[in-house]
Amino acid sequence: MKKRIKSVIAAVIALAMVLFMSMLPAAALVSRAEVEGVNADMAWEVLDIVNNERAENGLGPLTMDKGLMDAAQIRANEIVSHFSHTRPDGTSCFTVLSPDYKYGSSGENIAAGQQSAAAVMNAWMNSPGHRANILNGDFQSIGIACVYVSGSVYRYHWVQLFHSKVVDAAVRENTQTGGNTPTEPEVPDDGTIPMYRAYNPNSGEHFYTSNFTELSNICSVGWNYEGVAWYAPSGGDNVYRMYNPNTGDHHYTLNPEERYMLEDAGWNYEGVCWFSDGDIPIYRVYNPNAETGSHHYATSAEEISGLVSAGWRDEGIGWYGARQAP
């Protein structure tokens, strides 16, 4: 029997796709990367969007396949440090498949950096090659994986593996690992913006964001939601958010010179995260002994005093908020 191969490759920043139709040999699987969170719930959310897109285009739904999910999980771990359709051992991405998937058509979409199922699907559907995979009428099954690694460049890593037959249909379960589920508060009627606070029990880092979707995503992979830390104004002086790709730390600063200094030291600038204005001081302290989570920010003078008593260094007021959280 002749080997039949058809391939299409497309790539954009932090996003790539390949489609092959072939009979592929199985290969030994590489070790899994050490990750902070494996989010199967987000994988099923991607499937929901995939099948909605297929239905709108007159196609039948794809079935989540357990073998493809396992293979996609391995590939998601691999692309954390090797973002390519070639595996770290130099073989094709499809060597991750077991012999059960040896015959038929297969496809792979990979992506990194998108923080939600909706975001990654939006990116894929706006790329012709990726869209072609998702809307391929020959495919009957899919395996999807999402892993979160805070110390990596993109943090979120996504894989879709497609196949033309269903081998072992997966059962949808509630697979959330650790953390807690935040409840979005009502939007304030005074124009202020709630700043959410989350804690990583593994690294000791506190994380602050005004983006509730981002908060929900990190809580789904094990962070603990600690409530609204303060309310920020809708305008004022910029507060910059920085990210250390080596340690996974975030740092927030009102000082542009500090921002530039951190960029020169290898930190990634992630934009303006909120504004500083008002009468509520947000205090900043530094732990000289911590490798990660070395800075902490709070409106509570008592909380800051307790940390200083424990050896943290008082660095004064980081910025100002509009009002206290209730």
Image (cartoon, rainbow, N blue to C red):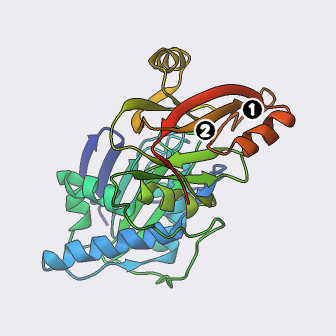
Residue behind mark 1: 291
Say what secondary structure mark 1 lies in.
loop
The tag on residue 248 is: 2
Residue 36 position, x and y percent, is: 64, 53
> Type of residue at label 1?
Glu
Quarter where residue 103 is shown: bottom left
Locate the C terminus and report the quarter of the image it occupies: bottom right
Left or right: 105 in relation to 149: left
Quarter where residue 59 is shown: bottom left
Query: Furthest-right residue in view?
Result: 310
Say what secondary structure mark 2 lies in.
loop
Viewer-nearest residue: 204 or 313 = 313
**Mark 1 nearby-residue class (10 Å; few <14, some 14–19, many ≥20):** few
Residue 185 position, x and y percent, is: 45, 67
Residue 178 position, x and y percent, is: 66, 67
Mark 1 vs mark 2, CA separation in Å: 10 Å
Residue 214 position, x and y percent, is: 45, 55
Residue shown at the point (50%, 38%) measured from the top left: 279
Query: Furthest-front residue in view?
Result: 279
Residue shown at the point (49%, 82%) measured from the top left: 170
Question: Residue 326, can we see it?
Answer: yes
